[in-house]
Image: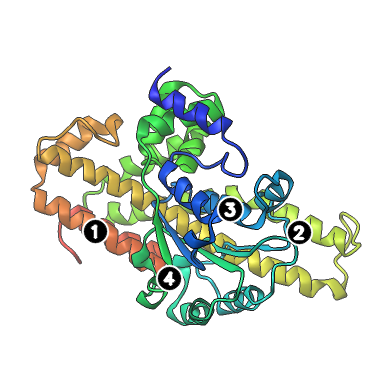
Amino acid sequence: MDAASETVTRVSERAVPWGEVWGQTDAVRSLQAAASDPAELTHAWLITGPPGSGRSTIARAFAAALIAEPGDELVMRQVLAGTHPDYTALRTEGVIISIKDARALVERSYFAPSLGRYRVIVMEDADRMSERTSNVLLKALEEPPERTIWVLCAPSDADLLPTIRSRVRVLRLHDPEIADVAALVAERTGVDVQIAEQSARHAQRHIGMAQRLATDAASRDRRDAMLRAVLKVRGVSTAVEAAAQIDAGASDDAKALTAERDEAERAQLLATMGVAPGAAVPPAVRSQVKALEDEQKRRATRSRRDGVDRVLTDLQSMYRDVLMLQFGRDHDLINRELEPELRAVAKAWEPARTVTVLDAISATRKNIEQNVAPALALESMLITVASGRTP
């Protein structure tokens, strides 16, 4: 049995609540020690790591270990399922975390635990707080309630204000190896080993994305089409066409991910309100339906922007490969399937131009995060790809 297979086996045999945490042995040991020894416990934590590293999963497991008495698997499973009264988690469905949601969390943090050892508040997208929202949270971190533990999650501690960072204990997760991600994906999904390896590579070790690519041929084809469309950009007209293709692809992806959930939520709401399937919505219920539709629109906006960001991440990997080839390194390319095309670009461009394009992609990701229209941001970025100069 190879090392990757041994890792998968160890994960499947690990006891509750850490069974879903994968590839973060050092972090698990630190959190286990904190959950069992008050001297090791801090009132506020920040778990950081790249997308797909398992920040939310390990935060939830930590919450279960804190709330339950040692060995009480029933309570641990309640926390893992999100049904325990002393566990609160926030993952925004919108582009940013609202002040209203942050205030609700802070208010809840001052309640004493009702059944468990601690009350645990998990904020899964702490990097999506504005400065005003961060200041709402700051007071709760400055004057922590007794027996309440905050667990924030973000890609990097640099994504939060210094005033927040100074009041939390940072736990950094690491990138798993591609071979390990591939072995895990193959174990979980049963896909061919080559597909699992390609998916892990293209997902850049993001476990969730790797699983999706491995099990969805349409997603793999869409990714390939996006990259090839950008490689064909030669001027303004082709830049505009490629930007429209990327934006439309992200929108279609978002609709595919949210449509079924939206319909189920609407049906559940109407059933709760006593509205029969297919019946007209009574006036008394329309406000609740409108509120749900508004929330779904915010979720769709975020999903679309996340889809565009995923394409930009893929483009970064592609031009990173070009830069690697320009410096004579070809043994660890992410996009091996495009190697002939990437070698042609590497030969035609100077490294400085590749760096300019990579900088433009990074700037575009930041601009879209700050609510710049995706289509316009993509067009500007792709004009840089075509010309090698920032517009």
Residue nearer the viewer, 27 or 177: 27
Residue 166 percent location from the top left of the image: 38, 73
Q: Is residue 195 visible?
A: no
Asked if the residues shown at circle 2 and circle 1 are in contact, with their CB atoms under 8 angstroms apart, the answer is: no
Q: Do the residues labelled 3 and 1 touch (CB within 8 Å)?
A: no
Q: Gap between marks 4 and 2, in whole Å?
A: 28 Å
The amino acid pointed to by label 1 is Ile
Compared to 154, does 141 lie above or below?
below
The disc, 3 or 1, on the residue closer to the chain's N-terminal end is: 3
Check residue 266 in the rendering and tell me which mark sits there, or answer none: 2
Horizontally, residue 23 falls left or right of residue 94, namely left
Q: For marks 4 and 1, give the CA distance.
A: 20 Å
Q: Which of 343 and 160 is in front in this view?
A: 160
* Upstream in sequence: badge 4 or badge 1: 4
Front residue of 330/120: it is: 120
Q: Mark 4 points at which residue?
A: 371
Nearer the N terminus, badge 4 or badge 2? 2
Q: Name the residue under label 1.
A: 383
Q: Quadrant of residue 228?
A: top left
Q: In which quarter of the image is the C terminus?
A: bottom left
